[in-house]
Amino acid sequence: MAIRRKTLIRRSGVEWTDYNCNIYQGCAHNCKYCYARLMTKRFEPNPFDWRDVKTVENAVELARRDIRTLHPGRIMFCSMTDPYQPIEAETGLARKVLEVLLDSSFHILILTKSPLVTRDYNLIRSHSNVEVGFTITSLEDIPFWEPYAPGNKKRIEALKKAHEIGLKTFASIEPWIPDITDPQSIIEKLRDRVDRFIIGSMQYAGVPRSFYAKQLPSLISWLDDNKVNYFLKKELRSCLNRSLQP
């Protein structure tokens, strides 16, 4: 099924990008921690079935229009869903929209959990205004939390391939899942293949801020000592000033 929208590229509330661009509604990965799914369920008066994925059928048309009217900046592709979830293998919509975005003065930040993005490396590598990023939540697969998403091991292989062919890469260590995600181990394993690490907390899932308050000082010290190129998202940084009590 498909939906139509009035705009595609919108101002972002995420501090490391200026705009977001979502070409699907919903996501077949259905990760249990997904902030977008949980936020929709919590705040939408009529929440939809998150796994009932719909395409934005006028996405290419809107992308062409929006890049002509907006001031150039960074576009997160995508923020509320995965541009390379299974339906993309049928529609090719991500590639069609990327063809428009990459031929613009905007900087594109592709974020995915799927090795399907490797299909488009031939397109991406011919442009300098793009980075390929993968959500990495562990060095191992975590099917309980990510039941329908490609595993972390496949993502890491696709990330390595991006680095090998000269693409600029980043890893999103978000969410930081207690007792599952070990940011330091992930960074030690991948830092030779990743240009930048973005680290964020778990949202809308009841994780006490005290967990991050206890862990952050030693992690930040290690990151700085090892000269890692990293960015802490603001909701994670705010935990530094929190009480260690839940």
Image (cartoon, rainbow, N blue to C red):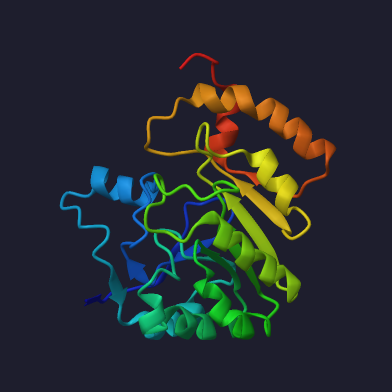
Front in this rendered view, residue 137 or 143 = 143
Judge by depth and name the residue closer to the eye, 26 or 68. 26
Counting from the top left corner in percent of width and height, residue 36 is at 36, 51
User: Would you place residue 112 above or below residue 3 in this image?
Assistant: above
Vertical relation: 41 (above or below) 237: below
The residue located at (54%, 55%) in the rendering is: 152
Q: Give the quadrant of the N terminus.
A: bottom left
Which of these two is toward me, 157 or 203?
157
Q: Residue at x 43, y 64 (%)?
A: 82
Of all residues shown, which one is farthest toward the top?
A: 245
Q: Position of residue 156 (x, y in %)?
A: 62, 60
Q: Residue furthest left?
A: 46
The quadrant the C terminus occupies is top left
Q: Residue at x 41, y 79 (%)?
A: 89
| Residue 229 as seen in the image, left or right of residue 9 | right
Where residue 180 appears, as percent x and y from the top left, is: 53, 37
